[in-house]
Image (cartoon, rainbow, N blue to C red):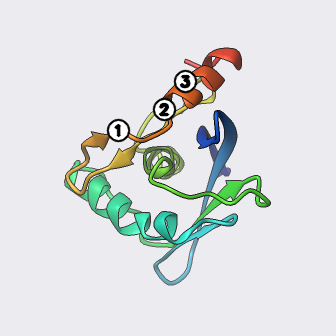
Amino acid sequence: MTTQKISSAIPTGYSAARITIECDCNKGLPRFDIVGLPSRSISESRERIRFALKNSGFSFPKDHLVINLAPANLQKSGNHLDLPIALAILAHSNQIPTENLSHILSVGELALNGIIRPVSGILSIVEYAEINHYK
């Protein structure tokens, strides 16, 4: 399997910054790591994402799963990256089609039951998506 990449953005003041979520999975003890300067709130999203996927009828990989949030020098905080991380996991594990994912910018918090919740700063993220020709 190749590394799966999903585009997202986080608010930075009155604008937004692009974040690329990279997902890779290797054989080994079951583990779920998020790297790339995540804040505590993003590190805690691991359990929200795990339960949201399971409660939505998907399976969660049982190997060593690593999520990289790029660029690594930008501090990421908030709940904006739950949905794109989940999409990266699902695409990497071949549970969803990947053909159109490169044209989509996704953002959203996940509830434990899989519902997508709104996030703050969405206007700057939508403006960023429009300027950069995302759907």
**The residue under label 2 is which amino acid type?**
Ile
Tag 1, which secondary structure?
loop
Residue 30 in view (yes/no):
yes
Give residue 32's position: percent from left, percent from top: 50, 72
What residue is shown with label 2? Answer: 122
Give residue 78's position: percent from left, percent from top: 49, 55
- Residue at mark 1 to residue at mark 2: CA–CA distance: 8 Å
Q: Above or below — where is 29 with respect to 48?
A: below
Q: Residue at x 20, y 52 (%)?
A: 113
Question: Tags 1 and 2 in contact by the CB under 8 Å rule?
Answer: yes
Q: Residue at x 71, y 20 (%)?
A: 132
Q: Above or below — where is 124 with respect to 111?
A: above
Say whether disc 3 or disc 1 marks the residue closer to the N-terminus: 1
Depth order, front residue of 12/37: 12
**The residue under label 3 is which amino acid type?**
Val
Instruction: Name the image quarter holding residue 44.
Output: bottom left
**How many discs appear?**
3
Q: Residue at x 65, y 36 (%)?
A: 16
**The residue under label 1 is which amino acid type?**
Pro
Depth order, front residue of 127/95: 127
Residue 118's tag is: 1
- Residue at mark 2 to residue at mark 3: CA–CA distance: 6 Å
Instruction: Name the image quarter holding residue 69.
Output: bottom right
Answer few, some or many: residues within 10 Å of disc 2's Cα (few below 14, many 20 plus, some between 14 and 19).
some
What residue is shown with label 3? Answer: 126
Give residue 48's position: percent from left, percent from top: 33, 62
Question: Tags 2 and 3 in contact by the CB under 8 Å rule?
Answer: yes
- Residue lying furthest bottom: 29
Answer few, some or many: residues within 10 Å of disc 1's Cα (few below 14, many 20 plus, some between 14 and 19).
few
Q: Quadrant of the C terminus?
A: top right
Depth order, front residue of 55/109: 109
Q: Above or below — where is 18 with respect to 57?
A: above
